[in-house]
Image: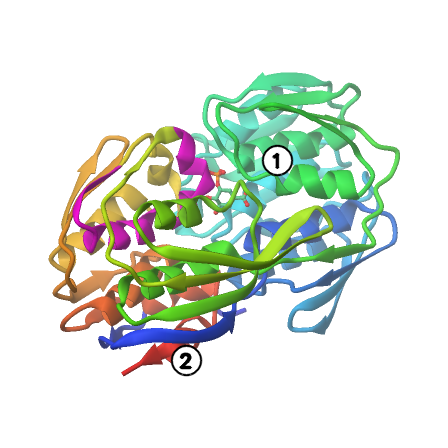
């Protein structure tokens, strides 16, 4: 998918939002369906695939590594796996684009394949830390070279030993990279997390027949003889639903239902926070498909009160923290985000870019070392100009800020939303009522 160059969009205020919508498939699950499907024996049928700039980077990567991917439809794929140790080294670098999840997870897989691999990425990804993955994998015997801890990265596949690793940061990407490396290690690997992070890798590896043991914050994976993953149903992405849920929470008179979204408890921090702030959140039609919880989420606007996000909650809504800043801007009182220094290592430094975006529309927001504070006023923010800085989540914050503002918001670099959600603006327009 072509991610278009910088484009400015003016987002005008609307009266409220209403309707029934669905959002594209979960990005985290879509990446994993491609990567684990590529290592399985036989076919993996993927329905509800979340097509975006990031997941297309992963599709291109698994193809370059020798797996075939049939695109039956925009969101329906068949991955023809090559077996756990069957990836082959392409004769050129694998371009991870903007996708941190791809770069981190594929490193774990490549560490035990036959051959030498090089990973590259765009400017943003090339600034993000890779040593957090390379370090523990080297302890397993992997040969990995980074440039000062960054991409481009060279991986020479070889024999791996087991590992027991206590993670210094709560990161699902780091955990997943190590667990995936465990698929090719001589002994089991165990990862111990400082706080629970999303567990899609563990769930999917279990569904594919790998031996996965979870005890509290510790996850162990043993190398399987083979994986089989006949089917993956990807739930709607709660992180893509978040901007719409926040818009509905902020605009009085709104009532919005987002259907079929993933409700994995490691991802639903925003729903708890919305309720805590006074929003009415209804969950309907809750069910489990292939280990993942799914349901329809309904939000009705109510007056909001400020809240504090504690460090242990951060991984449960890590990608929703920028848009949380907008909720906080319209909530009575001072909101605080603590223990979120990881935000500095996302597609942009999100403590800096989220606070700058909020300040640009007249909100009293301030950076702290490990998060930010927002002093809210229960009224529409003024509006202004927000630069997305190439970060899709900041562009989405800008767009929702536009519809809930008094004067509208000009979003610079607006098209970077295609990294996770190419149809974002048209869906926003479809729920907007003048
Ligand atoms: C992801 C994990 C999160 C999240 C990212 C996707 C994943 O990162 O921010 O967008 O798919 O594992 P960390 O858990 O590394 O913080």
Residue 368 at least partly seen:
yes
Residue segment shown in magenta? 312-336
Q: Which residue is mark 1?
A: 176
Q: Picture coordinates of residue 163 (x, y %)?
A: 67, 17
Horizontally, residue 420 falls left or right of residue 88, namely left
Residue hosting label 2: 430
Instruction: Report the residue at 63% width, 50% height from top.
Output: 293
Q: Is residue 106 above or below residue 54?
A: above
Q: Dot 1, crowdedness within 10 Å: few (<14), some or many (≥20)?
A: many
Image point 77% across, 53% down: which residue? 66
User: Disc 2 or disc 1, which is closer to the eye?
Assistant: 2
Label 2 Cα neighbours within 10 Å, binned few <14 / some 14-19 / many ≥20 = few
Disc 1 residue: CB within 8 Å of ligand 1: yes
Q: Is residue 91 visible?
A: no
Considering the image in quadrants, where does the N terminus appear? bottom right
Residue 358 or residue 274, whichever sits in front: 274
**253 versus 116 height, above or below:** below
User: How far apart, in angstroms, are the residues tagged by discs 2 and 1?
Assistant: 36 Å
Q: Identify the main secondary structure in magenta.
A: helix
Q: Describe the element under mark 1 as helix, strand or loop.
A: helix
Q: Position of residue 99 (x, y in %)?
A: 51, 50
């Amino acid at each position: 998918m072509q991610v278009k160059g910088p484009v400015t969009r003016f987002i005008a205020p609307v009266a409220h939002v209403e309707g029934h919508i669905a959002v594209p498939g979960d990005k985290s699950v879509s990446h994993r369906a491609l990567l684990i499907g590529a290592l399985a024996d036989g076919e993996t049928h993927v329905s509800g695939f979340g097509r975006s700039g990031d997941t297309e980077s992963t599709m291109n990567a698994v193809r370059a590594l020798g797996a075939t991917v049939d695109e039956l439809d925009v969101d329906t794929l068949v991955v023809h796996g090559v077996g756990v140790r069957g990836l082959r080294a392409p004769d050129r670098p694998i371009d991870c684009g903007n996708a941190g999840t791809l770069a981190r997870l594929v490193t774990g897989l490549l560490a035990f394949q036959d051959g030498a691999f090089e990973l590259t990425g765009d400017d943003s990804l090339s600034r993000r830390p890779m040593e957090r993955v390379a370090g523990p994998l080297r302890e397993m015997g992997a040969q990995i070279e980074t440039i000062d801890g960054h991409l481009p990265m060279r991986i020479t596949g070889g024999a791996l030993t087991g590992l027991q690793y206590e993670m210094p940061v709560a990161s699902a990407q780091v955990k997943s990279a190590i667990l995936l490396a465990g698929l090719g290690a001589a002994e089991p690997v165990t990862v111990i997390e400082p706080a629970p992070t999303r567990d899609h890798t563990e769930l999917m590896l279990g569904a594919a027949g790998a031996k996965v043991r979870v005890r509290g914050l510790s996850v162990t994976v043993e190398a399987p003889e083979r994986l089989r993953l006949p089917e993956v149903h990807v739930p709607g992405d709660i992180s893509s639903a978040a901007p719409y849920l926040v818009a509905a929470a902020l605009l009085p008179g709104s009532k919005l239902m987002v259907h079929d979204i993933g409700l994995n408890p490691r991802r639903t921090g925003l729903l708890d926070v919305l309720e805590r702030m006074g929003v009415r959140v209804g969950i309907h039609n809750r069910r489990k498909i292939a280990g993942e919880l799914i349901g329809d989420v309904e939000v009705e606007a109510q007056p909001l009160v400020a809240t504090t996000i504690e460090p242990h909650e951060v991984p449960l809504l890590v990608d929703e923290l920028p848009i949380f800043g907008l909720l906080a801007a319209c909530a009575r009182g001072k909101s605080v985000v603590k223990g979120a220094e990881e935000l500095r290592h996302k597609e942009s430094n999100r403590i800096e870019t989220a606070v700058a975006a909020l300040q640009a529309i007249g909100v009293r927001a301030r950076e702290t070392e490990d998060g930010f504070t927002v002093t809210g006023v229960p009224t529409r923010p003024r509006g202004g100009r927000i630069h997305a800085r190439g970060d899709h989540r900041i562009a989405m914050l800008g767009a929702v800020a536009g519809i809930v503002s008094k004067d509208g918001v000009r979003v610079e670099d607006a098209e970077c939303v295609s990294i996770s959600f190419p149809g974002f603006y048209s869906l926003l327009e479809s729920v907007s009522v003048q």
